[in-house]
Amino acid sequence: MSVQELTMYLNTLDIYQTDLAQIRPVSRLVSTAVFLFSGLMLCSANASAVQPVTPDYSSAKPGDVIQIKLSELYPTQMAVGKLQIDGDLADYASDPESLFNDLCKVQGAGKLAKSDATSTPKNPATYSCTLAVGTKKADMNTVDVGPEGKLYLTDGHHAFNSFWEVPDGGGDVTLSVLIGENLSRDSSGKPLTQSQFEQKMAELKHFLPIDAKGNPITFSQLPDSLGLSKFQDDPLRSMLYYLRGVSYDKSDKNLNPETGKPYPEVPFLEFYWGQLLSSKMDLTAYNLHQQDDYIRALKDAAALMVGLPKQQLIGNSGQTAAALGQMSRVDKKRLKKLAKPGSKLAKALAYQASH
């Protein structure tokens, strides 16, 4: 009903009033009703016009710890190893506490101290960790700040997609991340354009410019948010998850002979190893849905990796095998453990087959 219609209706009430003393209150009733109705309509219009405010992190500094929602993060890679994420989801389904333990770890807060049936990844106040958030910054995932203070995830696409995919997950999952670089402005303080920012991200190798098949992509082709359906599947990336500690490890596990210091961290390290393996292995020769054949593929890949010269450049990384964590020999004990019926590989394959 419009304001005019309401006014006409209420004014008809005057027809039935014969007492002048009663007419005035009725008239005042009409005016009051029209005023209230108009106010309600105005509030409704204003409410519908309100838009969600996008947080601006332009003032954040490298090393800062900030709390965010997953929906605020922009990916910097197109593909993930979906079997790795299936393994996480299998763990969370069988042991809900493991979800909160992982949430504590990625926030640099140690291990899970307490959770209960009311705990939710959307509210960090519903569970507690053994340490304060940000205590172990080396365990945290990093984000770079771009134009308009937007956040670009440079590490943690697998873990954060796993958190997104749990039953009580999605974009409202709330956790803390570590600021890596603030690239919203240049050295003189002038705001960077989106094009300038993308160029800088490429120079820093904080953007992976390939898809799951190794084809080149542009920044604009990246997923617009987290969520597993937004990403391509890269089977080699999953294999490299299981090969960590078998044929390679983190970059800082090896010392640079020129400096005597550990090699620095390399973003997207596993994908560069994947580029190397894709040039030397034909994955169609293996049934990667069957555990025994998956182990055979891992053995072949591990032998290739440790057999490379330490100074060989790997993929498009511009880094050597040694700088990318190459191990001197295959850890056969770890491979044997993966081959067992109840291993994390077995659980991931079983979860993948049923979902």
Image (spheres, grey):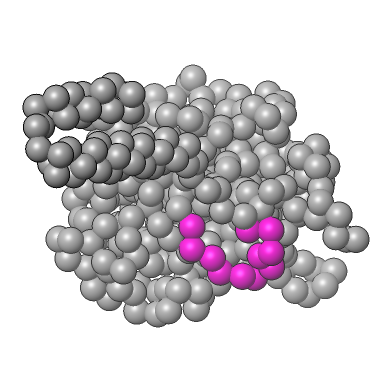
Residue at image location 48% in from the left, 30% down from the top: 230
Judged by its main secondary structure, the magenta piece is: loop
Residue at image location 16% in from the left, 29% down from the top: 14
316 falls in the magenta region: no
Magenta stretch bounds: 57-68
Q: Is 106 on the left or on the right of 31, as rendered?
A: right
Residue at image location 34% in from the left, 65% down from the top: 124
Residue 210 position in % (x across, y down):
67, 31
In the rendered image, the vertical position of residue 194 relative to residue 329, given as above or below = above
In the rendered image, the vertical position of residue 111 relative to residue 239, given as above or below = below
Residue 19's quadrant in the figure? Answer: top left
Q: Nearer the viewer, residue 8 or 140?
A: 8
Q: How many marks?
A: 0
Residue 339's quadrant in the figure? Answer: top left
Position of the C terminus, as image quadrant, is: top left
Q: Is 205 on the left or on the right of 245, as rendered?
A: right
Tell me, yes or no, if residue 150 can be seen here.
yes
Residue 115 position in % (x across, y down):
22, 68
Q: Nearer the viewer, residue 291 or 192?
A: 192
63 falls in the magenta region: yes
Tell me, yes or no, if residue 80 can be seen here.
no
Residue 126 position in % (x across, y down):
26, 66
Residue at image location 76% in from the left, 54% down from the top: 183
Position of the N terminus, as image quadrant, is: top left
Residue 137 position in % (x across, y down):
55, 72
